[in-house]
């Protein structure tokens, strides 16, 4: 069926009345001169389409069906009632149309088919004064109006050449049809009865089948992915896909109810079904864009909200004036699909995993849409009947199917990734971070490493061998588990990853698998929090008698000697290192390697001579110096390395030191300045003053002794060369 726009007849007006009259007489003479319709016309492919130019009179009078009624003063109108060419006084819900045609004897008393190519209201068809057919019921109420597009009515001409056809036509909703279809009338066609019946059955069957396939498959896909989303709510991609396919299914269903055959038989539904189609299709296009953004963008871009607002505006526009905004509707959908294509093409060029599947779907959409467009413009001929003028939904179905295949493969891979992540990280990362990795599995390769700037963490309990000798195996496990649980909770809360445990030692890193720009800050503050948690543990063990007798005896003895019970050394170093899954295909560990890692380990073990708790390298110090209280500890050349490094001790958060500790820090810093100026005697005196305030300050003790030695035998430089690891 041709589009309504193709059925409009142009009219040429003129201000000169005489020219109009001459033109009208010319048309009448041509009509009178035209040969009668014959059986050959009926057998042609197009049959006989009755002219849309009819005599018209508003109102309702049964006498207007009579063949001898004089309709000479009736106006000529277009029976399709286009919005721009209504009768002089407008349309008044009901009126009569009359036309005369000539047929030869080959059509007399021959069963023909009367088809309504266009029929937006209800009508009664009169032939030579007799009611021969009707479309719907011409009553007084709106509910009695029905439309029968594609229906076939039997029709017989009388045994005479001149035939009068009169149509009593009613459409109380003409304004609704004008806003959606641009016309509100009818257009009749005569055809071979057998062919018309077969054609009508074929069209109805084809339309139902196409509707079932093109709307049913997206609906089933929507249900499937809703179930997938309910089984795994973190997968928002399935939710977005389910929404967009459900909207497409509803849009296609509504469209097939009115076009190309008209499966709905209630005329009043047509304007609303068409409006609803526009709304659903706009929303479906926007949700398709949201789905693609979810596939290839870490966050929903602001561009989506622009499209969403524009889509809502387009929805209002097409609901109020659908026909006038049809071009804007097409432009909006085109721009939306271009943006979707851009995202998919970018993903393909970036070699995103299996993005080519989406590319095939969009190729199907482009081919289907292009074919549909070219067929409608009569640039290329149809190939497979009515389906050729409706290949865009087939292309759309191809796109939706490719999306589903892509998601199905993603779900299968996501399951494998979840199993891998749970195996690799479940015991070493906070649950929230594990969920992030599962949601973004690309951040972790299943085998292999990468160079990344991170922070390595090593910690160890001083003299743990002595502690373990005081405990039974069961007591040792309980003690170490309590300690490790408290420490690891702090590390994980700061975004750190537990690499491994070696007895009481904890090895961790910050900045992988999820990268944080402030990994050094996180690690440093986590160390401070761990030291404070250790103080709480010591307090708890003392007040609750939580230690076995032998261990409590050891603690009392150490405290009497001025030693801290469960003193923990923590070494931090930031810099480039290799991190990733390392091992064989059957067994891997997500771990770190590199000189920076070794330096952190040296910082932890090297604190034995300083008596410190947290040591960091200069790269970390540059990032945390305004956040913490820290002091320069030494210039150290670790074993196996030529270049010395500067080590700093972290004492506490900025402003958290007691006045006594602040005074010790001030004297220590003054002593370091004198020490670095090779003024060892002055430096020793300053360190001694610090020790008078805090006799347990390990670095001041070390430097007081070192300055005494250097004052007697000045060194060539101030680099401390470690002799052990």
Image (tube, rainbow, N blue to C red):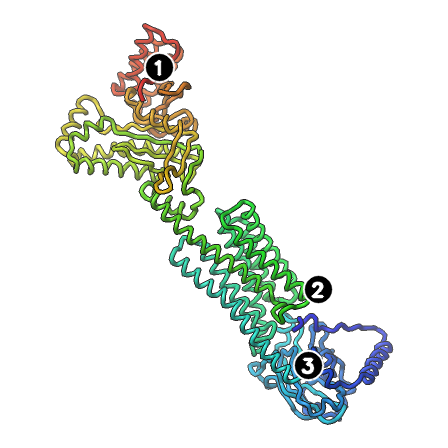
User: Viewer-nearest of labels 1 and 3?
Assistant: 3
Disc 3 residue crowd, few under 14, some 14–19, many 20+, Cα 10 Å? some
Q: Quadrant of residue 185?
A: bottom right
The CA span between labels 1 and 3 is 109 Å
The alpha-carbon separation of the residues under discs 2 and 1 comes to 92 Å
- Against 645, is 85 above or below? below
Q: Earlier in the sequence, mark 1 or mark 3?
A: 3
Image location (x, y in percent) of residue 361:
55, 57
Task: Measure the alpha-carbon separation of dots 3 and 2.
Answer: 26 Å
**Quadrant in which the C terminus appears:** top left
Give the mark toward the camera: 2 or 1: 2
Q: Are marks 3 and 2 in contact (CB under 8 Å)?
A: no
Identify the residue at image location x=33%, y=28%. 652
What residue sits right under mark 1 in the picture?
A: 671
Numbered tag placed on residue 120 in the rendering: none
Q: Which numbered disc covers residue 189?
A: 3
Question: In x, y percent, where is residue 649?
Answer: 34, 24
Q: Looking at the image, do the residues carrying marks 1 and 3 touch, with CB atoms under 8 Å apart?
A: no
**Residue sitting nearer the eye, 430 or 668:** 430
Does residue 142 appear to the left or right of 167 in the view shown?
Answer: left
Q: Give the crowd class for mark 2: few <14, some 14-19, many >=20 residues within 10 Å.
A: few
* Residue 277, horizontal then vertical, whole percent: 56, 67
Q: Is residue 464 above or below residue 680?
A: below
Is residue 651 shown to the viewer in this render?
Answer: no
Camera-nearest label, 3 or 2: 2
Which residue reaches farthest front? Answer: 585
Q: Is residue 120 above or below residue 353?
A: below
Mark 2 highlights which residue?
379
Q: Quadrant of residue 273?
A: bottom right
* Left or right of 278 on screen, residue 668: left
Q: Is residue 185 left or right of residue 681?
A: right
Number of numbered labels in the structure image: 3
């Amino acid at each position: 069926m041709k589009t309504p726009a193709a059925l409009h007849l142009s009219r040429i007006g003129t201000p000169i009345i005489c020219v109009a009259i001459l033109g009208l007489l010319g048309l009448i003479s041509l009509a009178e001169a035209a040969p009668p319709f014959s059986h050959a016309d009926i057998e042609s492919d197009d049959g006989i389409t009755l002219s849309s130019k009819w005599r018209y009179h508003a109102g309702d009078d049964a006498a207007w069906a009579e063949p001898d009624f004089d309709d000479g003063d009736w106006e000529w109108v277009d029976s399709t009632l286009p919005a721009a060419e209504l009768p002089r006084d407008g349309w008044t819900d009901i009126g009569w149309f009359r036309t005369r045609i000539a047929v030869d004897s080959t059509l007399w008393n021959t069963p023909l088919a009367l088809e309504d190519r266009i029929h937006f209201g209800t009508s009664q068809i009169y032939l030579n004064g007799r009611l021969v057919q009707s479309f719907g019921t011409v009553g007084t109420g709106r509910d009695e109006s029905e439309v029968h597009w594609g229906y076939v009515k039997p029709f017989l001409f009388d045994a005479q050449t001149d035939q009068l056809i009169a149509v009593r036509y009613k459409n109380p909703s003409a304004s609704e049809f004008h806003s959606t279809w641009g016309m509100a009338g009818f257009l009749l066609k005569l055809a071979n009865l057998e062919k018309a019946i077969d054609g009508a059955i074929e069209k109805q069957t084809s339309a139902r089948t196409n509707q079932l396939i093109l709307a049913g498959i997206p609906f089933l896909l929507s249900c499937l992915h809703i179930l997938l989303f309910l089984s795994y709510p973190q997968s928002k991609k399935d939710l977005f896909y389910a929404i967009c396919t459900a909207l497409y299914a509803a849009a296609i269903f509504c469209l097939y109810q009115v076009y190309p055959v008209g499966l709905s038989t209630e005329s009043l539904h047509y304007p609303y079904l068409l409006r609803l189609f526009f709304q659903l299709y706009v929303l479906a296009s926007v949700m398709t864009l949201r789905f693609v953004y979810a596939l290839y963008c870490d966050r929903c871009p602001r561009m989506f909200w622009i499209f969403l607002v524009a889509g809502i505006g387009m929805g209002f526009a097409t609901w109020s004036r659908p026909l006038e905004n049809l071009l804007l509707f097409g432009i909006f959908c085109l721009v939306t699909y271009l943006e979707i294509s851009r995202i998919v093409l970018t993903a393909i060029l970036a070699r995103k995993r299996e993005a080519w599947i989406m590319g095939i779907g969009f190729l199907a959409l482009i081919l289907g849409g292009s074919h549909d467009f070219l067929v409608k413009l009569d640039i290329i001929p149809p190939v497979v009947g009515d389906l050729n003028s409706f290949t865009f939904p087939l292309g759309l179905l191809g796109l939706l199917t490719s999306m589903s295949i892509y998601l199905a493969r993603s779900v299968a891979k996501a399951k494998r990734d979840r199993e891998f992540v749970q195996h690799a990280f479940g015991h070493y990362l906070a649950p929230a971070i594990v969920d992030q990795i599962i949601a973004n599995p690309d951040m972790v390769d299943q085998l292999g490493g990468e160079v990344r700037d991170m922070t390595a963490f090593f910690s160890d309990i001083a003299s743990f061998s002595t502690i373990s000798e005081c405990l039974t195996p069961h007591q040792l496990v309980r003690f170490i588990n309590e300690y490790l649980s408290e420490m690891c909770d702090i590390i994980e809360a700061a975004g750190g990853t537990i690499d491994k445990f070696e007895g009481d030692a904890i090895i961790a890193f910050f900045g992988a698998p999820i990268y944080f720009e402030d990994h050094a800050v996180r690690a440093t503050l986590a160390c401070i929090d761990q030291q404070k948690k250790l103080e709480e543990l010591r307090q708890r063990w003392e007040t609750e008698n939580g230690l076995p007798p032998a261990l409590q005896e050891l603690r009392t003895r150490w405290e009497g000697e001025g030693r801290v019970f469960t003193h923990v050394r923590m070494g931090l170093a930031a810099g480039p290192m290799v991190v990733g899954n390392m091992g064989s295909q059957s067994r891997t560990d997500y771990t770190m390697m590199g000189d920076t890692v070794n330096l952190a380990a040296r910082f932890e073990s090297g604190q034995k001579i300083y008596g410190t708790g947290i040591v960091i390298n200069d790269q970390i110090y540059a990032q945390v110096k305004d956040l913490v209280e820290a002091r320069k500890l030494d210039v150290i050349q670790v074993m196996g390395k030529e270049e010395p490094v500067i080590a700093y001790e972290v004492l506490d958060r900025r402003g958290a030191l007691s006045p006594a500790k602040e005074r010790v820090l001030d004297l220590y810093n003054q002593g370091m300045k004198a020490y670095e100026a090779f003024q060892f005697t002055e430096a020793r005196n300053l360190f001694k003053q610090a020790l008078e305030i805090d006799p347990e300050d390990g670095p001041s003790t070390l430097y007081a002794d070192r300055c005494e030695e250097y004052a007697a035998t000045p060194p060539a430089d101030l680099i401390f060369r470690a002799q052990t690891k």
